[in-house]
Image: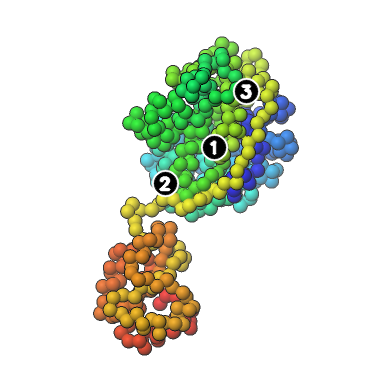
Amino acid sequence: MLLNEYEWSRNPRGMHNKNAPIKMDMNALSAVGMGWAKYTAISDEYVNDIAELRARNITPIVRLWLPRFGAGAPEEKQRYYQAYLEAGCKWFELYNEPNLDIEWQEGVLPDYKNVAGIIAPLMTNWLRWAEWIIERGGYPAFPALSEAIGEHYDVISWLRAMLTFLGDNYYERFRAVAANGLWCATHPYIYNHFYQEDGSPSRARPPERQRAEEGGWHFEYPYDPISQAHKPGVTTISGPPSAPNGDPIGLIGMGDAFMRLFREWFGGGAIPVVGTEGGIFPVPKGGDFHQLDKRYPGYTAASHAEATVAMFNWIAQQAPPWFFGVALWKWDDYYETPYGPSAAVIRMSEVAPPFKEVPPLEALEGEGTAGIPRGWIGPGPIHGRPDVHCLLITPGFNAEWFFVAGKAYYERFRPQILPSADFLDNLTYRQSAGITVLALPNIAESVRLQLAERYPAAWLDIVAVETLDQLAAVLNERAMRGLRFG
């Protein structure tokens, strides 16, 4: 799928439900111009809402909830996913923040270093579910992680472990999922990692002077000028000694981290990223003032409202093309305050929602390095049959014999004739090779051992003959019987 082929509202504003089975007021969602509605469901309690949401151009996202689900089997809720698919929902999640203890059974420590006990069952079950969703026309989400730093729950370490396992064990299957409807769910609770310029890119306006419709907003943390001035060169996955795993705690942070590793390890292009929980958090009440990171201005209820409108405008107009929006956490924080709807809800109702243009970007653009052993040179493992068929004429063998005795064989199979075995160094781990080797009997075994050591994954097809007639007999029989290799 191309990035612009995913079906959605093209409106980045979203809201997360309070909790199941409580419904969100659709008139209220429409009044503030919501484009996403995220539901955590117990069963099929929202199935009958899907058609109306779509009619209102609000794209539903559904995750079926079970307490402490861990790496649970997706079949436990499969009939309900099927019901939502049949109702017209396309966007789905399976697991939720699996890097947190609370998502696992009592006594289970979800450590990213425990590949066999934690990562392997989680990602194996997830991949099976993702393929099942795609077969039925849906879009499966790569699991959202809690954006926690350090210890066994470190978010970037978890992301690396999950993708490493997929690359080592299911490289082609994961790429097939990526090419046919995968998206990445994130939980961007951005705190006060944003600002509006005050005369220069690195100087921030105080909250009382922020205005949503005016320019100069920065939501690209950690790539904004303030962050880069404090930690030069920091990215979402790497940085200076003070942040060796990077700093992804921003609006596009975990989406950017996923895209960087997806591109490097799997040859990824662009797939959608949607924040299925998040926003500027916590939502202030009354006279609250929040400033978790002292490098950035804090926010009040009024400035939170301006910044929320600006955030969605920024997503539509300036964010990477793959970032599709955020479902604000959550309904009761925004609609059920002691004073009624929050200032952010009121402000959004006054401003028309933005529309995001999406370019036709490919999901995959190359091969990637996932699963390739360090230092590997030459062709990789064969899956089924070799991608490339080469013919090597070894030193001392009369090359003219092949062009006389091997004419029928060559015309049928068209192997690439190599001047030297060194050519195989140009093949990559993602390309497999079968090598037909023409050698005199007295050196055939030595040649086989040398090639096997140098190219351990290649299929070696040794033809050891010492006369023209012997070569003709072997190759003509193969051509007649349709046997590329002996």
Pick out the residue farthest to the top.
Answer: 287
The first of marks 1 and 2 along the sequence is 2
Name the residue type under label 3. Glu
- Image height check: is 69 above or below 169? above
- Helix, strand or loop at label 2? It is helix
- Helix, strand or loop at label 1? It is loop
What separation in Å lies between label 1 and label 2 (alpha carbons)? 25 Å
Residue appearing at x 62%, y 44% in the figure? 4
- Asked where in the image residue 155 lies, by quadrant, the reply is top left
Q: Which residue is mark 2?
A: 164
Q: Which residue is mark 1?
A: 320
The x and y percentages for residue 182 are 56, 46
- Determine crowd level at label 3: few under 14, some 14-19, many 20+ residues with C-alpha closer than 10 A: few
**Residue 213 marker:** 3
- Helix, strand or loop at label 3? It is loop
Instruction: Tell me, yes or no, if residue 142 can be seen here.
Output: yes
Pick out the residue farthest to the bottom.
Answer: 469
| Contact? badges 3 and 2 (CB < 8 Å) | no
- Asked where in the image residue 39 lies, by quadrant, the reply is top right
Q: Nearer the viewer, mark 1 or mark 3?
A: 3
Name the residue type under label 2. Thr
- Image height check: is 95 above or below 337? below
Name the residue type under label 1. Pro
